[in-house]
Amino acid sequence: MAYLRISILVLSLVFLSFAFSEAKEVIVGGKHISWNIDSSKTLNEWIQKKHFRVGDQLKWKSDKDSDSVLQVTKEDYESCETSKPIKANVTEITLDQAGRFYFISGVKEHCDKGLKLVVIVKPPKHASPSPAPATATGPAAPPSTNAAAGPGFSLSNGILGFGIGLVGMALI
């Protein structure tokens, strides 16, 4: 009977650990904001409140008034250069590395008026504390650490460690 309780406790903690490290799917601008010039200010306010991690997926909501979305370099983002995107006609993208991702409207005039976004991506919660290499999309964001717990600490590691401690205590 005690082994059954311990097994249930361990399985629960393992599932909790996966829940905290799961990637999320995000609709750019939310359900009610489309990618168009009329919503550029709202989109930029929205993106500043969001936190993204490696593995998250962005999807663009489109409608008849939506512009195409281009993933570009930092330089092309700043100048609204639409002729040489990293990826054209983006409808969804998986954020596969830490750093900055730059997106602009495929219509240069709309980009010039502000229809563009910078997405800052943090390393996965279970990542090692060493920084990722710089890429064409920009420098990697510095890893976050919990000073009290030391480098490499994450909530899922803490829960798993706590669960192992509980199992050890239950066996005594």
Image (cartoon, helix red, strand yellow):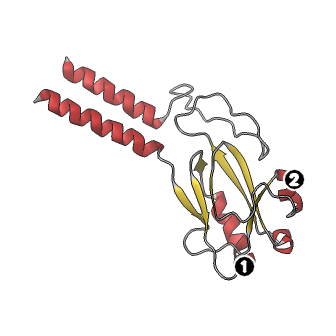
Q: In the rendering, at what x and y percent does residue 139 appear? A: 77, 40
Residue position marked by numbered label 1 in the rendering: 38
| Residues tagged 2 and 1 counted as in contact (Cβ below 8 A) | no
Q: In the rendered view, does 49 fall on the left or right side of 17?
A: right
Disc assigned to residue 75? 2
When asked about the image quadrant of residue 9, the answer is top left
Give, as a three-letter code, the residue at label 1.
Asp
How dense is the environment of label 1, judged by Cα within 10 Å: few (below 14), some, or many (20 and up)? some
Sequence-wise, the earlier of marks 2 and 1 is 1
**Residue 81, relative to residue 41: is it above or below?**
above
Crowd rating for badge 2 (residues with CA inside 10 Å; few <14, some 14–19, many 20+): few
The image position of residue 3, as x and y in percent, is 16, 27
Q: Residue at x 32, y 37 (%)?
A: 13
Tell me the residue at 40%/39% (across/down). Answer: 17
Q: Which residue sits at x=67%, y=68%? A: 43
- The quadrant of the picture occupied by the N terminus is top left
Q: Residue furthest bottom?
A: 64
In screen coordinates, is 7 left or right of 13? left
What label does residue 107 carry, if any?
none
| Secondary structure state at the residue bearing disc 2 | helix
On the image, the x and y values in percent for residue 84 come to: 85, 58
Above or below for 47 versus 1: below
Q: State the separation of the CA atoms marked 2 and 1.
A: 24 Å
Rendered-image quadrant of the C terminus: top left
Looking at the picture, which amino acid does disc 2 mark? Answer: Glu
Q: Nearer the viewer, residue 65 or 48?
A: 65
Q: Residue furthest top?
A: 172
Q: Nearer the viewer, mark 2 or mark 1?
A: 2
- Tell me the element at label 1: helix
**Residue 36: quadrant of the picture:** bottom right
